[in-house]
Image: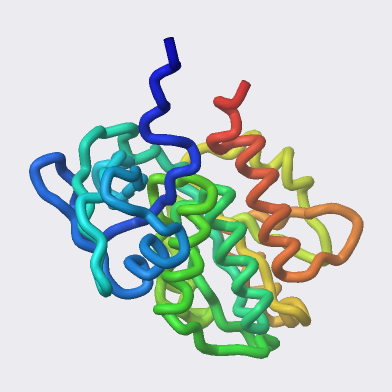
């Protein structure tokens, strides 16, 4: 007797949609998402698509109709609730566009709750295209099967970030001049936390002094080598997730 086909198949395409999902309400996707499903993935009625809404979690949906400019989907099975997200922020100085794209993508894959782009004196960029940033994090979340999207905060200057910092949140500062080993600092810290990493040229002396003087700041070291901004972000998030984040539940 032939085995019953898996539903939904692991090869089913994944999409985040803005509409809150329910088995009582079909979902119509248009634009780039419809093009991706119909022209790239070549879905047809009866095929499966995995949908996430950043609210209720992950659903299996069945393709009902494919048109020239739209695809109609019917959610059928609630597969997973929205994942619990560790209360960990990345505060990253803006880099050149392609390098900051890497930061957005990898921070999403690694599971941060919020990405806060910051402007410092040595930044080579001072703006971020919000639509492009949303697209990058959404595609990264789809690729790695996240059911939650990180929040992208508005671009802010370093002095404003420090001035408005919530006092209950640890601010781990990746300092090129050194500090406590990151793994040790993360291991013993409890509660909300964030990682602050600098631009290509690093923080200047006045910025470094202001960060170190902040009552929530904890200077940390990410090892003996000077890391690029995007590398420091990836390394710091990875260590935090291993020591205090949601990697702890992995077997």
* x and y percentages locating residue 34 in the rendered image: 32, 67
Q: Give the image's coloring scheme.
A: rainbow
Instruction: Decide which of 191, 110 is in the foreground and name it.
Output: 110
In the rendered structure, the answer to whether residue 191 lies left or right of residue 74 reads right
In the rendered structure, the answer to whether residue 53 lies left or right of residue 174 reads left
* x and y percentages locating residue 47 in the rendered image: 33, 45
Instruction: Decide which of 188, 8 is in the foreground and name it.
Output: 8
Q: Residue at x 39, y 49 (%)?
A: 148
In the rendered structure, the answer to whether residue 233 lies left or right of residue 249 reads right
* x and y percentages locating residue 150 in the rendered image: 43, 57
> Which image quadrant: the C terminus?
top right
Instruction: Decide which of 239, 179 is in the foreground and name it.
Output: 239
Give the vertical position of 133 relative to 181 (above or below).
Answer: below
* x and y percentages locating residue 224 in the rendered image: 91, 56
Residue projecting furthest to the front: 1
Q: Residue at x 41, y 76 (%)?
A: 154
> Which image quadrant: the N terminus?
top left
């Amino acid at each position: 007797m032939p085995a019953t086909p898996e539903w939904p198949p692991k090869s089913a395409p994944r999409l985040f949609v803005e509409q809150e999902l329910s088995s009582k309400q079909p979902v119509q996707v248009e634009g780039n998402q419809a093009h991706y499903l119909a022209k790239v993935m070549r879905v047809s009625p009866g095929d499966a698509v995995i949908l996430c809404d950043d609210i209720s979690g992950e659903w299996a949906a069945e393709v009902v109709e494919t048109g020239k400019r739209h695809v109609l989907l019917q959610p059928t099975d609630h597969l997973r609730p929205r994942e619990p997200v560790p209360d960990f922020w990345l505060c990253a100085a803006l880099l050149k566009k392609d390098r900051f794209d890497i930061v957005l993508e990898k921070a999403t894959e690694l599971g941060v709750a919020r990405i806060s782009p910051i402007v410092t004196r040595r930044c080579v960029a001072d703006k971020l295209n919000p639509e492009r940033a949303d697209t990058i994090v959404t595609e990264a979340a789809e690729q790695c099967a996240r059911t939650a999207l990180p929040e992208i905060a508005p671009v802010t200057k370093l002095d404003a970030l420090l001035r408005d910092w919530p006092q209950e949140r640890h601010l781990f500062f990746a300092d090129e001049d050194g500090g406590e080993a990151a793994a040790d600092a993360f291991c013993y810290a409890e509660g909300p936390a964030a990682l602050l990493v600098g631009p290509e040229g690093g923080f200047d002396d006045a910025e470094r002094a202001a960060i170190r003087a902040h009552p929530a700041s904890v200077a940390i070291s990410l090892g003996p080598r000077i890391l690029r901004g995007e590398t420091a972000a990836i390394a710091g998030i990875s260590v935090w997730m291993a020591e205090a984040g949601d990697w702890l539940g992995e077997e």
